[in-house]
Every structure is written in structure tokens, then in C-alpha cells.
Amino acid sequence: MIQRLEELKQTALKELEAINDLSNLETWRVRYLGRKSELTRMLRGLAELPIEERKTAGALGNTIRNTFESVLALKIEVLKTSSIQQVTTKDTASAARQDITLPGRPFPYGKLHPITETIEEICDIFSSMGFAVLESNDTELDYFNFEALNMPAEHPARDNMSTFWLDYENERGERKMLLRTHNTCVSARMVAKLKPPIRTIAPGWVYRYEATDATHLTMFHHVDGIAVDKGITMADLKGVFFEFASQFYGEGRRVRFRPDYFPFVEPGVEVAVECVVCHGSGCRLCGNSGWIELGGAGMTHPKVLERGGIDPNVYTSFAFGFGIDRMPMLKYGIDDIRLFFNSDLRFLKQF
């Protein structure tokens, strides 16, 4: 047994000395230190030897195992150091061949999401017309989202805004908190908080529990604006929209106003812009109508002004609200709103 152990030691060390790469080193480790190695089998067979020979062979076997582990660790360090030196030598040689007068490689950089760029552009345009930009919470009271806007409880107009109600009840058991369905609630707060003259816009997220398709999402961006002063007419509203369409979509873009009903304005209008894809001839994006609806607008209802403490006999007002996400669709000819939120860099890098 002792002679076999000595022969195994000499053979293993000789093989180790000839190894020059880490992959072959792992093979050597499995062969001489693994669970099925010859050294392991010999140590397991010590029980069959006489007691004196067992002690001598066992001590020698453990010594050989420790020797193998030590020389293996040393060999690993030697090969790793050699590998690093080879890489460094190659890099140095490569650097010597580089032309430092060549321009550097461009680094990829981040940029704003197209929706964020659109919001900033909208704010810049309305700011140039004297509107202040406001922000508010995504959660809102039922009063400002509905009642202050001439939509009391059980009003049929509430059915058009499938609402996410929050798990909150007041002392009378009424659910009065919700995720805002439109940013017109911010305008209602401004009417109650500020004194005329008022000119504000409020962009931000709004939420509606409805099915998604190419032009609708359950969570989307909305901007609402209001102007309150003496002598404001529908002509002022039309002038603001024509100026906005001209700056955002370019000169010559047609804008259409059609009568429509909204509880918080009287009279109310639907505002639409000529489809940028088909230029009015009809396509999938515009539903073959040639127009894309931006949103609603009109002269603010006297009751909305009264609830805010403003005398409608002295002051008049116009208000408007439209979805922001559809605007870059119009501008760039995109036929599915969901592309903006799929996080596909191939799509987003185009902007």
C-alpha cells in the first residue's frame, strides 16, 4: 500500500508540472483529489490492512492529500498570473498600434420619452400664451372630480368616466375618494382657490376603467386648461386652439369644432385636428373620418363658476381638456398608442 501511494504521488506531481492551462488543471484535480480518485479509493481500503500498516499508510495518505492540495493551489496562482501577463502584453501591443488622432467612439446616451417631450412642448406653447402650468395629486375628492363640475351624484355623465374608486369611506359611509378621471378637477380647484384673472393648464396622469385599444388606455396623460376674466368669448377659445395647432402641428393644420355636450361647459364643442397620416382622406388611425379628436372644450358653465365663488354675471370663462398621448400619434403618424408604453427601444430610439 505504501509503495503504491509513493508511486501515485510521483506520477501525479509529474503530470501537474507539465500542465499549462486551467482547464487541464481541473481535470488533474478531479483525477487525484476527487471523490472517485485513486487516492480516495486507497484511503477507503485502509480498513482491510493490519493495524500497524494501517496507521503508517493512513498518515502517508493524508500527507499526500495535503501535498496535492498545496501544489494545486500554487499552480492555480501561477497560471492565473501568467494569463494576466499575456493579456496585458496583448493590450500593450494593441495600444501601440492605435492611432490616437482618430475621433473617439460615441457613447450611447439617454433621452426623454416622446410623451415627456410632448408634455414639455405643450407647456411651452401655453406658457407663451400666458397660461401658468400647475400640478396636482392623482387622487381626488368626488366633489372636485364631479360635483364641482356640475355632475352631482347619479348624474348620467358619470357613466362615461368608468372610475377607479379608492377603499376609503367618510363618516357617513360614502366613497368620496378616487383616481382622477380627468384633469378638469384641477381647474375646479383653481376656480375655488384663485381670483380672476385666471389662466392655467394642468398636465398629468388620469385613470379610467375601460378596455384598451389602438387609441385608448386605462391610464393615460391628460391636460386641462381654463381661463377666467371679464369679456372672454368663444372666439378667444378658438384663437387659443388655432394658435396651439399651428405651433404644435405646423402651419396649415386644420382644426374642426363641432357642438358637443359636457356638463361643465355651455355651450360645449368637440375639437378635432386633421389626421396627419391620411390628411383627411380616411385611414385606420382616424377611423376613416379624416379627423382625430383632441378633446372637449367650451364656455365654462355658470354653476361651475358659482361653486368656486366667482360671479358669472361679471366674469366669463372658457375651458378645455384633451389627451396628450394622442398628440404625438398625430404628429408622427403612429397608429397604436400602446407602442409608447411597451418599452421597446427599437421604437423609442426613433424619437
Image: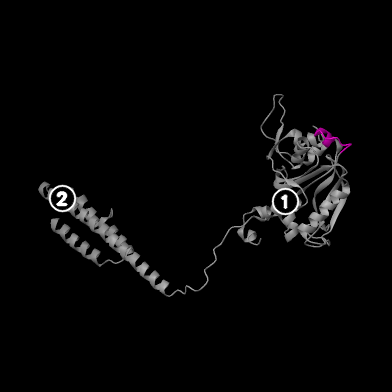
Mark 1 is surrounded, within 10 Å at the Cα level, by few (under 14), some (14 to 19) or many (20 or more) other residues, namely many
Mark 2 is surrounded, within 10 Å at the Cα level, by few (under 14), some (14 to 19) or many (20 or more) other residues, namely few
Mark 2 lies on a secondary structure that is helix
Residue annotated with mark 2: 59
In the rendered image of this protein, does residue 284 appear above or below residue 54?
Answer: below
Image position, residue 70 (x, y; %): 23, 56
Looking at this view, is 86 or 305 the one in front?
305
Which residue in the rendered view is the most extreme toward the top? Answer: 171
Q: As shown in the figure, which amino acid type bears the numbered disc 2?
A: Ala
- Quarter holding the C terminus? bottom right
Residue ID at (84%, 34%): 306
In the rendered image of this protein, does residue 143 appear above or below residue 29?
Answer: above
Which residue in the rendered view is the most extreme toward the left? Answer: 52
Q: Is residue 120 magenta?
A: no
Image position, residue 272 (x, y; %): 82, 53
> Can residue 204 be seen from the camera position used here?
yes
Residue annotated with mark 1: 123
Residue ID at (64%, 60%): 347
In the rendered image of this protein, does residue 134 appear above or below residue 347?
Answer: above
Location of residue 1 by image quarter: bottom left
Location of residue 314 by image quarter: top right
Question: Which of the marked residues, 1 or 2, is nearer the chain's N terminus?
Answer: 2
Relative to 176, 48 lies left or right: left
Q: As shown in the figure, which amino acid type bears the numbered disc 1?
A: Cys
Looking at this view, is 37 or 221 the one in front?
221
Image position, residue 156 (x, y; %): 82, 37
Looking at this view, is 103 or 157 the one in front?
103
Tell whether label 2 touches label 1 (CB within 8 Å).
Answer: no
> Can residue 24 be seen from the camera position used here?
no
Task: Give the magenta-colored segment's residue range.
Answer: 303-314
Q: CA distance from mark 1 to mark 2?
A: 84 Å
